Image: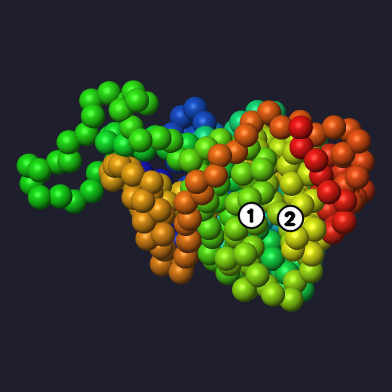
Amino acid sequence: MRILQDHSTLVKLLDTLDEAQKRWLVGREAMLLGHGGVKRMCEVSGLSKPTVIKGVKELRSQRALRPEGGRIRQAGGGRKTLEERDPQITQRLGRIMEETTAGDPMSLLRWTSKSTYQIRDELRRLGHPVSEDTVQRRLKELDYTLQANVKTKEGSAPPERDQQFRYINRLAQEYVARGEPVISVDAKKRERIGAFKNTGRNWRPKGRPLEMNVYDFPHLGVGTATLYGTFDEQANQGMVNVGMSHDTAEYAVESIRQWWRRVGRREYGRARRLLICADGGGSNGSRSRAWKCFLQQLSNESGLEITVCHYPPGTSKWNKIEHRMFSFISLNWKGEPLVSFETVIQLISATTTRTGLRIKARLDKRVYATGIEIAKEEMEKLNLRLHEKNPQWNYSLSPSLSKISKK
């Protein structure tokens, strides 16, 4: 029986062997595995590739005989451990991973992990000459694991991607330290309202499933719900504006306005600034003139300096609201037909998590016009300041007395 079938047993056994015995054992397993066995055993055992290959060669040449008596090396021989040679490397590696690891609850912003080659280059830039194999081994010792691929790729990433994420993270930490709000905003998928089947299952009396329409034709329903959410990670609470009209820039800003009036102003009454993290397209797109103009109106009304940081193209799935609020709403109403707008409001408001997530929902009956054009002259009236870092994605709007006209 191969020891490789139980990795923990292999690791424990290696701790009881001397250096020669370790490479012989690992070499034997690599030979049994066949093609790719050396690479696999390097990953499992933590031994270097040359060591495993040496063990294989010794076994094949039948020279794997331990010399009579004692150790293979003198006490204290061999290379010193990485920590002994470079005690700062673990701390530096930890900082890099804190900035780039997805899913760490202690950070305001996480995104896709760097490769071991990128981490190696970053460490070398900081004065730590290491190899990618060393980085991989240290990451395993720090309880990091390789994760399976998920469907998050939406297109090619711009060269400023990592720089933008670092900038957003730094700004978010600054706002939180001063007790000022940081919100993530986005529009959820439009939902057809009526007696339509909703994907998923829930508990019901045996043999009594809810009967829904066979077809999903729009005329069989009562309308379409346009959902725009605002999520505050500091307070772990959010708000969803359930619209009955179009997803426009005016609707998006109105949703933020309602969050500020109903939730934000109570939580951050002394705040003078607001940081909004948003995707780069849609109703809150980075190039949308209407989005900026309606934000200027909100800034004038609230007296807040509103700073907007857009996620780079192809990274919208890393928006906090996606996996911290919208995902739980979808889980809560799976299998529940959205037969009316009131049902949508109730299901959203009833969404909670073990970490204490709270969500408010309101029905917005206003009709939002599409095709609103903002002239260049009106844009010049905005009290708009572009940031030095990636100005195409980062800008601030301060209160102004100028009024914006719509055409």
In this image, 350 relative to 299: left or right? left
Q: Residue at x 78, y 63 (%)?
A: 304
| Marks 2/1: CA–CA distance | 9 Å
Give residue 222's quadrant in the image. Answer: top left
SS state under label 2: helix
Q: Residue at x 79, y 51 (%)?
A: 296
Q: Residue at x 36, y 54 (%)?
A: 347
* Circle 2 residues within 10 Å: few <14, some 14–19, many ≥20: many
Residue that lies at the very extreme toward the left in this rendered image: 207
In the foreground, 146 or 333: 333
- Look at label 2 and name its amino acid: Leu
What x and y, as percent, mark residue 254? 63, 50
Question: The N terminus is located in which quarter?
Answer: top left
Q: Is residue 287 visible?
A: no
What x and y, as percent, mark residue 330? 40, 47
Question: The C terminus is located in which quarter?
Answer: top right
Give residue 290's quadrant in the image. Answer: top right
Q: Residue at x 85, y 32 (%)?
A: 375
SS state under label 1: helix
In the foreground, 141 or 176: 176
The structure's colour scheme is: rainbow
* Circle 1 residues within 10 Å: few <14, some 14–19, many ≥20: many
In the foreground, 91 or 27: 91
Q: Which residue is mark 1?
A: 256
In this image, 378 relative to 307: left or right? right
In this image, 7 relative to 23: left or right? left
- Look at label 1 and name its amino acid: Ile
Q: Which residue is mark 2?
A: 298
Please determine whether, in this image, residue 120 is positioned above or below residue 288: below
